[in-house]
Amino acid sequence: MIESQEFSLVKLIRSFRYAGSGFEKFIVHERNARIHSVATLLVIVAACIWKTSIGEMIALSIAVGLVWIAEMLNSAIERTIDLIRKDRNPEIEYIKDISAAAVLVAAAVSFIIACLIFIPKIL
């Protein structure tokens, strides 16, 4: 029998609490999350100082958001693997390296987007 998936405000609020708790744990326990926090703050300050357009703000928001998502997924993948296996294993290293590379690519693309937006405004 399929259970009814009726809307429940209580369940919705609970799911937001879980997400908030996850974000808090991410900030507290992951060093790179704090680095991304500083970078995000710098982007926001730069956007205010150099008066970015709506289109530029959208591009910056997407870029910053992708870095956060990549870092969160990377952290989740690494912790999951560490929970399952403690030993060194070439396949595990491969998975972790690719996961970390995804964050690097997202950060590099975000940096390029920021440069394309801010360098002409600064010069």
Image: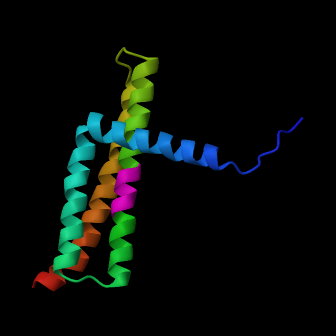
Q: In which quarter of the image is the N terminus?
A: top right
Out of 54 and 110, give the one closest to the viewer: 54
Residue 26 placement, left or right of 76: left
User: Toward which corner of the image does residue 66 lie, by quadrant?
Assistant: bottom left
**Furthest-right residue in this view:** 1
Please tell me which residue is depicted at 32% across the width and 70% down the height of the picture.
60
Out of 89 and 3, give the one closest to the viewer: 3
Residue 60 placement, left or right of 41: right
Q: Is residue 24 visible?
A: yes
The overriding secondary structure of the stretch rendered in magenta is helix
Coordinates of residue 105 in the picture (x, y in percent): 33, 55
Residue 48 placement, left or right of 96: left
Residue 2 placement, left or right of 91: right
Q: In which quarter of the image is the C terminus?
A: bottom left
Out of 108 and 47, give the one closest to the viewer: 47
Please tell me which residue is depicted at 41% across the width and 51% down the height of the picture.
69
The answer to whether residue 8 is above or below residue 87 is below
Q: For the magenta stretch, what is the residue range?
A: 64-69
The answer to whether residue 121 is above or below residue 109 is below
**Furthest-left residue in this view:** 123
